[in-house]
Amino acid sequence: GITRHYKFDIKLQNVTRLCQTKSIVTVNGQFPGPRIIAREGDRLLIKVANHVQNNITIHWHGIRQLRSGWADGPAYITQCPIQTGQSYVYNFTITGQRGTLFWHAHISWLRATLYGPIVILPKKGVPYPFPRPHKEVPIIFGEWWKADTETVINQATQTGGAPNNSDAFTINGLPGPLYNCSGKDTFKLKVKPGRTYLLRLINAALNDELFFSIANHTLTVVEADAIYVKPFKTNIVLITPGQTTNVLLKAKAKAPNATFLMAARPYATGPASFDNTTTAAILEYEHLSASTSKNKNKNNKLPLLKPSLPVFNDTTLATKFVSKIRSLASAKFPAKVPQKVDRKFFFTVGLGILPCAQCANNTRVAASINNVSFVQPTTALLQAHFFNKSKGVYTTDFPTNPPFKFNYTGTPPKNIMATTGTKVVVLPFNASVELVLQDTSIIGAESHPLHLHGFNFFVVGQGFGNFNSKKDPAKFNLIDPAERNTVGVPSGGWVAIRFLADNPGVWFMHCHLEVHTSWGLKMAWVVNDGKKPNQKLPPPPSDLPKC
Ligand code: C2O
């Protein structure tokens, strides 16, 4: 591979959406941020210079960061933030990965405006395992708030309630024609008849899983979270925050007398309110001459066809879509599913409450894993681990099972207060881990897109209701399960994942709904060094920010 240099200048920029202008934090003044393009095997040196008042970190979501945890980016987990006037060079090599990922800020709610695509092409001369597309187009979903997002989350934290919903969803930063005064703020995709396009779908929205569809066109899913999958056709894609999905779009052989809307709106299962509006972009055919289109008027307008999106709580459809995602599991792209397990964990994930003196009812909404609501430390866990200075920073007693037993998806028992702490699980190098994630309904069942840093995992099983440790493991798929970095824990259900702890460092795991992360639905794994030199985490770079 080669070395590629990028410069990310974090600065303010005025951006107008929904008829209002606000100053947002951007990379190089761009929104969405710049695209990173590299090939498998390349080394990236990305210098991030902070010219704004906020503390900043950037995370390269889905990049394995093999032995380069110092470049992973979650604030106070692998690094202290980059302070105003400071800079830090993220230095990592893309090993054994190709596909679509994305980068985003990983501190507070700044990823609302700080995000952009990562495109990893295969090594030179290596083809895709599907027909070569005529063009590749990132389609990145986001959310837009009229208000300042730092204010939105800070107010929620102070009052103990839920933050306001966003005012619009966006496609490539644009709300699209279904929102007020956004006709001009619409992404347009022009296609040529008969050609195939690779759409690199990325869900960078803060708080919403999304259904996506294009009117009158079928999509072929070929990749999920930068892993090739067995191709399958679908009209609807479900994509959670943190997930990426590549789909092939085959343009019709003859340019039709219509334009087509591609649209996305939420899949939502939780007790919280959400914004059920629709973001849309336009698919337009080239080579439309007046003679081929009877319906065309002088304004060059063709009828606009709309896709039919599922209702917001269509869990049947969501489940059906997710179950179709299978690893390619071919000779060239084998699924290396751990067949034996060294360490087993059972984690509940869900919402709960915590005491809060200044809040209404003296409680606040919290979220937890095994009833521990994670408390962000004031210095980074990775340094503490590397320099053997964990005392006062974190403890290693994260519970491997929930502290209470109940019917997790039934009526919750009374008075379940979460506990708090900065707790981690320590794993020996190369341990093979099986983790069952069980949704709880303490405040209400809800789907949680769980994201693991530093690894891909295999989704070996999933189901509704309570996980049955006697019966369910017999049904695990150890042959071609989906390999991902983010998985939706079903609302009122569970998923089982397996991964090999072959990457020394400290690895964050959290719900990729930003509001749940803010409420504490997060924890970290500490993976110890192996014995061999190439199994150890190298020392930190000299420019690593200090707290
Ligand atoms: Cu995409 Cu820890 O995040």
Image (tube, rainbow, N blue to C red):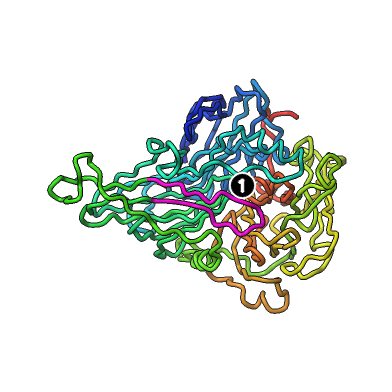
Tell whether 311 sits left or right of 364: left
Tell whether 380 sits left or right of 187: right
In the image, is residue 211 above or below residue 388? below
Q: Residue at x 22, y 41 (%)?
A: 300
Pick the front one: 354 or 536? 354
User: Residue 279 magenta-drawn?
Assistant: yes
Pick the front one: 318 or 40? 318
Mark 1 Cα-neighbour bin, 10 Å: few <14, some 14–19, many ≥20: many
Please identify the residue farthest to the left as the structure is shown: 291
Q: Amino acid at mark 1?
A: Leu
Q: Position of residue 140 (x, y in %)?
A: 47, 44
Boundaries of the magenta span: 262-281
Q: Residue at x 62, y 68 (%)?
A: 462
Local SS, label 1? loop
Q: Position of residue 519 (x, y in %)?
A: 73, 47
Q: Position of residue 181 (x, y in %)?
A: 43, 36
- Queried on whether the Cβ of the residue with tag 1 lies below 8 angstroms from ligand 1, the answer reads no
Q: Is residue 390 visible?
A: yes
In the image, is residue 337 above or below residue 510? below
Q: Position of residue 543 (x, y in %)?
A: 66, 27
In the image, is residue 102 above or below residue 151? below
Tell whether 491 sits left or right of 131: right
How many marks do you count on the picture? Answer: 1
Pick the front one: 271 or 251? 271
Residue annotated with mark 1: 66
